[in-house]
């Protein structure tokens, strides 16, 4: 027995920080298991420790509006959130992710909320309730079980365990994925009446738009175009700075308005930022918005979106704003990941090179565009209720009060 205990301590001592934290936690388990679940505690993670954004934010905002006595804990990473005291509402406690304390908060919370698969977590206890909000607003790409052979085995194992713990999965409304439970290795309850973070897309607030313009010191006389490419799993995004400048010029000339571009890279894309922003001649025309903590606020302020295979096209369908698909690497991407629908079947202008994109912008007809978008939404059941945050918030309150 002494040798076994000694061996455990040796593994902890020589292991990574992650192993040490887990080891310490489970060494304390004989004591921890007597600590009860705190019924009004909610622990939230956003993209493995990012700031106050995505679905968790909008669920929180609703819960805070109810004036219920709740203990809401947000798990954050300092590399994403440098000043948590300035980012989170005062009613929310923020705790550093990947620490003993973060595991303890999860262990004693009644409710868990996450938008990605948990990669630093304990096993869920009896009596706890786990809500997986996911992070896509429209299903264009093959995901999860449908591409299990292309995903890292470690991720697949983690995804299956995550789904086994999950009590409620929030997923967008469309018919793009035929069997959502199968795709997610999931057998529990589904909520498909809207995505909490899109409530603000349905009910935009002028003060939110003003906040975005103010954050980047953009004149209200200018329009915002956002370039938001998706993540490439096995190769890098390739976009040169001149292309971005040209897009701004194309739009300004077509719509006789001065445009500013926000570049919003995927949370998993850490390499492209350096290559794109090597250009020092951008001035105030091309702005890096990758670190802004709420994509939905950016979308509220955006006039036009340029993207590729990103699920953000779902928000553009709902808001019926201008959206152009720029798929310069279509053939390569199809081999890498694949799509549920051919790009030509989407209700957006499609281009595979800069010349085609310029032509699509020059020939854009908003009336025809709206007809196409509305027809597609009706055909594929794309909708947002505008009150998903309240629906999910009330489910949480019911769990807490039961």
Image (cartoon, helix red, strand yellow):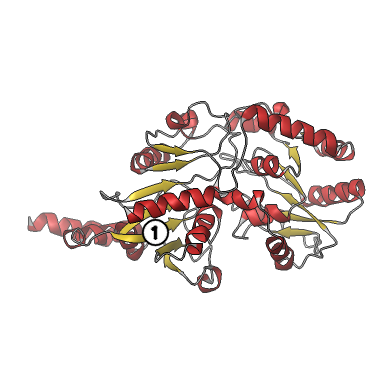
Name the side, left or right, on which 73 lies relative to 390.
Answer: left
The residue at the point 52 percent across, 51 percent down is: 389
The residue at the point 59 percent across, 60 percent down is: 293
Mark 1 crowdedness (10 Å alpha carbons): few <14, some 14-19, many ≥20: many
- Spot occupied by residue 370 in the image (x, y as percentages of width and height): 78, 36
Residue 275 seen from this side: no
**Residue extending furthest toward the left:** 1
Name the side, left or right, on which 53 lies relative to 310.
Answer: left
Using the image as rendered, state which of residue 122 and residue 192 is in the foreground: 192
Residue 163 seen from this side: yes
Q: Identify the image quadrant of the N terminus.
A: bottom left
- Spot occupied by residue 245 in the image (x, y as percentages of width and height): 83, 52
- Spot occupied by residue 133 in the image (x, y as percentages of width and height): 48, 46
Q: Which residue is mark 1?
A: 42
- Spot occupied by residue 25 in the image (x, y as percentages of width and height): 26, 60
Residue 140, image quadrant: top right
Name the side, left or right, on which 235 lies relative to 156.
Answer: right
């Amino acid at each position: 027995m002494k040798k076994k205990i000694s061996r455990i301590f040796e593994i902890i001592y020589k292991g990574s920080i992650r192993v040490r934290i887990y080891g310490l936690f489970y060494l304390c388990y004989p004591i921890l298991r007597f600590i009860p679940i705190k019924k009004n505690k909610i622990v939230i993670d956003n993209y493995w420790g990012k700031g106050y954004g995505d679905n968790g934010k909008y669920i929180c905002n609703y819960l805070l509006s109810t004036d219920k006595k709740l203990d809401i804990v947000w798990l954050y990473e300092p590399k994403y959130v440098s000043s948590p005291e300035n980012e989170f509402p005062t009613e929310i406690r923020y705790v550093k992710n990947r620490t003993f304390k973060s595991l303890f908060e999860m262990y004693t919370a009644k409710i868990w909320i996450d938008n990605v698969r948990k990669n630093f977590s304990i096993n869920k206890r009896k009596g706890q309730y786990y809500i997986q909000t996911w992070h896509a607003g429209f299903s264009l790409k093959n995901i999860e079980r449908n591409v299990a052979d292309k995903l890292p085995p470690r991720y697949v194992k983690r995804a299956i365990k995550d789904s086994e713990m999950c009590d409620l999965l929030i997923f967008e409304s469309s018919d793009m994925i035929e069997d959502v439970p199968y795709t997610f290795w999931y057998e529990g309850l589904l909520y498909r009446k809207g995505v909490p973070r899109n409530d603000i897309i349905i009910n935009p607030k002028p003060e939110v738009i003003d906040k975005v313009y103010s954050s980047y010191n953009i004149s209200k006389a200018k329009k915002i175009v956002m370039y938001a490419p998706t993540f490439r799993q096995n190769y890098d995004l390739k976009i040169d700075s001149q292309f971005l400048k040209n897009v701004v010029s194309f739009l300004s000339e077509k719509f006789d308005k001065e445009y500013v571009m926000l570049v919003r890279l995927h949370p998993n894309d850490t390499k492209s930022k350096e290559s794109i922003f090597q250009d020092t001649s951008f001035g105030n025309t091309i702005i890096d918005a990758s670190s802004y903590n709420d994509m939905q606020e950016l979308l509220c302020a955006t006039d036009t979106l340029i993207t590729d295979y990103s699920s953000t096209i779902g928000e553009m369908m709902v808001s019926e704003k201008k959206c152009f698909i720029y798929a310069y690497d279509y053939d390569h991407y199809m081999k890498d990941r694949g799509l549920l629908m051919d790009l030509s079947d989407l209700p957006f202008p499609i281009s595979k090179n800069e010349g085609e994109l310029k032509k699509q912008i020059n020939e854009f007809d908003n009336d025809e565009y709206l007809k196409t978008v509305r027809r597609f939404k009706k055909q594929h059941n794309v909708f947002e209720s505008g009150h998903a945050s309240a629906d999910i918030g009330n489910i949480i309150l019911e769990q807490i009060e039961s």
